[in-house]
Image (spheres, coloured by chain):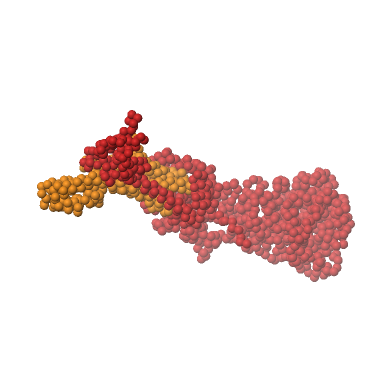
Amino acid sequence: MTPPPGSQFGGNRFGAPRQDDPNKKWICGRLSVTGEPCPQGPSKRGYCQATRECSPAKIGGAWRCRRAPANGGPCEEGPGWRGRCPHKKPACKPQRTLRAQRETVARWAALLTVGILALTFAYSADTTLLMPGKLTAAHSALGKCSTCHTNVKDGKLGWLHSVIARTTPEKDAKACLTCHMMGEAALNPHGVRSSELTAMSKRLEGYLADISTPITASLRNTILPASNLTANGVYCATCHQEHQGQSFDLTTMTNDRCQSCHKVQFASFRSGHPKFEKYPFKRRTRIFFDHGKHFGEHFSEWTKKNPGTTAPPAICADCHNLSADNKHMGVKTFAEACSTCHIKQITGADRAQGPKGIAFFTLPGLDLETLKQKGINVGTWPKQAEGEMTPVMKLLIGWDDERRDMLRRVESLDLLDLTNASNDDLRMVQKFAWEVKYLFYALGTLTPSRVIARISASTGTKLDEHRLSELSSTLPRDVIATAQSQWLPKLKTEIEQGRRAGWTAWLQQNSFEEEALAAIRNERNLSPAPAPESAPMEATMEPPAVPSRQSPAEKKMETPKEDMAPPEERPTAPAPKIVRDKEEKPQAAPEAAAQPGPASEPPTKSGDQTDDLLIDEKDIPKGGNASLDNRDGSDDRSAGVMQIVTRQINAAAKGPIRLAQRLRINEFGEIVEEDEGPKARSTAPRRDEPAPVQPTPKPKTTTPQPAVEPAAKQTAEPPSREVKSAPVPLPAPAAPAPKQLPPPTPKAAKKVTPKAAAIKKIEKPRRNAPAKNLKTPVLDTENWAEFGGWYRQDYSINYKPTGHADRFLRAWLDVTGQAYTGADFDAASALFDELSHKDAQGQCNKCHSIDTSNSGHLQVNWKPSTLTTRSSAFTKFGHAPHLSLFDKNLCLTCHQMSDAKGQKKTYEGHDPSNFVSNFKQVDQTKCAECHTPSKAKDNCLLCHKYHKEPARTPIHSTKLPN
Amino acid sequence: MQRVAVNSLIAICAVAIFSWILWAYDTSLRDPQYFDGWILFSGMLLQLFLHIRKQFPAFSLGRAASWLQAHIYGGYVLVIMFAFHTGATLPDGFFEWILWTLFLIVALSGAVGSYLTWSIPARLEHFPIRISFETMPAMRFKLAKDMEAVAAYSASQIGSKSISELYAQSLSGFFKAPKNIFAHLRNSRRPLTRLISQIDDAERYADPKGQETLRQIKGLVYRKDQLDYQYAHHWLLQTWSFIHIPATHCLFIAVIVHIAAVYAYSTGAP
């Protein structure tokens, strides 16, 4: 046997042939049987190729035998004509090489793996077997992978879709944000807006010069800058890697990762961390409290002045306590820490002089004499009213530009002396007067919230129901009703007449009046009112000196010869007669329709002027307050009685029977009968007798009496009659404390009527001063409201703080602060300034600081710093773990008192960052003593938060079960 | 020793650099598992070059021994990569367990193989000729045939009954198949010594011709023992690859599924 070519078996001492090709998959079967493999070997597919003794070769066109000499050499027969050896040999059974067997095993193993995986996927309930690890316990309830992996479809092979259609990290991050709401800038670094981030970066750039970046960090920043990644946002999974086990802390973050984006990078807290700057006080405290002053002066003074009473605080814990989460050291409540010394300052009990309440509504004083002379009709207006308009009223009246212009102009005038006022000014005063009246009318007619809602239009701020409730819910209807009935007894009639006649069309621009009417209609379940009565009237009647844009009125104002005369003196056609007298009603209505009054004609007769002074049972409105709006659907019968009486009192002022001499409304809004002695009682009219008519004193004017129709002469009186009539014996408000007025100008002096002069001789009282000439020995209203609340005094309705955290005052400060512009003639700003003045009643802002908000308005800090207010800070600190580590100085270990002065001065401004602290900043080296990697640790997240705003969890909109 | 020190130093430096890169990758808000995962997969692909080299010996792709050396070093590096990639922690998911187990099998079998490829050539180096595993049966058959011829000669020409009995009782079985595999792997010569002692015992009673025949038999026994020694070690070399290579096939399939799943569920940092 010839050894295979290339084999070394010939030299092998074993004498065996060698199979050289290691990749051969088959070996001859004879090798293991005879030790002599055939030279051909098996085919590639493993078939024996040595089934004959030789493989003939074609040489020279003929087949030649090539049998080996060992097998006998070439045979005699030779190959057949097809070149096939005629000597057959039994075929061997080729064997697979070990390598081939190994490959086969490998293939089968691979197939087995595929099969196992396929079966596993097929029989598994879901794709959780692909999860690299369990979800954290908080997320373990998330059933589907597609909840977080937004591009993965449902189903066992749904994940393969995501392999092809890749998603963006942002899309997945937004899936996180559906449960962890982080605001609009959630994916920005730290969840803050870019502008804020830029500002923060700029602020930190100041440290660059002092802090050197570690070499490794510099190299890292050069090779793999993080800024490239964060340019488009930092996605949730960048830091929060899930599938790391149930108890894995998803918020784990290394210091190096924290710093990777920062311009200032340092080695550790102890080495390189920026020094504390104004920490922990980056702004002034929200509640002004001068620790030094209290420790040094106030506490000792209190002890001296009040021996044996409650001792002032002696230790920090007397005023400060640890919050529920043991982190924040807060301030105790006012009642716990401050009330003992400061409550009287709030309620006004300590106020030695000046009013204790705040005037919210007043009836401004007007120079009625001049107005009358100039023919300016303001209707009924008490001559004793001498107050000034309050900022609240300005706010409620000046709800549009036109009215604000009016108020601005009126403010520039001396309303008590209009002798030098121009016609335009007077027209403005008239309009102003009617606006004031309409305000009082609205206050009594509508729900207070609807009136207060005007602030929205005045300030542009939106008021929700809660805020409206705070602003208006305490307004007492009775005080307003009483004030209205005494100050402006014919208010309702005047307004309604004006509205019917159309000359108050400009007042109807007040949307809430329409609302009120609609509300009343709804309340009574009536069909909608017919077209406004004023519409046809307006077409036929010219309003009397209406300060509106209606041209006829303006024209008349420009030609005052006739029209400027008082309405009652003008020889004009009779005004529409609107009476309530049953007998007159049938005639009056058509008359009013048929004979519209002139433009300058005021209503000649009001309903109450025709009423009997004695109360008739049937006159008592069933539906409540007659003086305000007897269409009110309420069932307050007693109020109705009171209003009828009030109306009669007003009628008595001009009628023959002076019921008001017996009946009066006292300071408390109660109807009382004054004891006028037997004589007076004997002259009192009986119920069934007609009331004797008391002639109205004639006014001493040079102007001619207007032609009044006879019926009107007996029953009606022009609205401005009080100027010329005898003083109405109204109760206390009509008797202000005397005050010297400045001498009138010569021109004014000439025109002043004796009555007006007499009035002006009376000393003008302070607006809110208590009346001193009360005859009834009762407590004045201000002192009666010992613990605060509403009360009426003179011609003003006042509010006295009820104590700390007064909801009403607080709401007004909030609303006006929100609308604060600081501009001149800005009613909201004026009101805020008045309420927040250091000497204002309540003295809210003595302690509660005022900040300028982001929108440029003002915001009163009602609460001290809390966890909520500090939640947006990047730094966090827990007091509790540190309390046991103090040295002998206890709290002063960290909070050392500062000698800096001028703290109070900084609170006069509205910039919270401009402040002087009572304490020095905390020393960072003190913290670094413990906060090292080996002791208390110095992880960034130990003291800092990444997300400025904490995540909020949405409440899902679950439909109510049927 | 110096070579080991140099190699160790290089290995330490490589691991240190790789660790720093991973640190930089991680601290620059990237996900290092993508980075070391692809490094790991690339390394696994590189390991396949040994197989390619063996499949295509005709191409001048370098010496197979060098490839094997690179394959072994690469294997150790991949174990370190794997430790980085997995955080050197046990897996937590079903599929992760499959991956981890397969990698462990491949790595362990590879480690065993590297030990064998390091230790067995040293054992076989005193043999002048290396024999391929496939040709050993032919050699074994030839030795058996030679032995049979010697036995037949001694029985017919010498008439030695003891030689015939020796052949019938011990030698025929010895030459028929590979014997004493585990003894050879343990480098134990006890079976050979026992057989040789039997021949020596028979020699004591044989005549000079018989003694000559027994010396020839002894020579054949030694050669058969050497053949068995080589067979045992080659068998071991071949057998461990029956674990390593099929496990590698399985691992690659699992890795491909793993990569697909990773990118299907990927989110966050690149």
Locate the C terminus of chain A and report the quarter of the image it occupies.
bottom right
Residue A869 showing in the rendered view? no
- Asked whether A870 or A267 is in front, the reply is A267
Q: Chain B drawn in what color?
A: orange
Residue at left 34%, top 36%? A80
Residue plotted at (76% across, 51% down): A508
Query: Is A147 drawn above or below residue A302 in the view shown?
Result: above
In this rendering, would A904 be left or right of A209? right
User: Looking at this view, is A305 or A655 the one in front?
Assistant: A655
Q: Nearer the viewer, residue B2 or A16?
A: A16
- Point out residue A701 in the picture as x, y percentages from the top left corner: 83, 52
Left or right of residue B19: residue A913: right
Q: Quadrant of the N terminus of chain A?
A: top left
**Residue drawn at x 81%, y 60% as measured from the top left:** A608
The hue of chain A in the figure is red
Where residue A900 sits in the image (x, y, percent)? 48, 49
| Residue B220 percent location from the top left of the image | 19, 46
Residue A413 pos. (x, y %) = 72, 47
- Residue A685 appears in view: yes
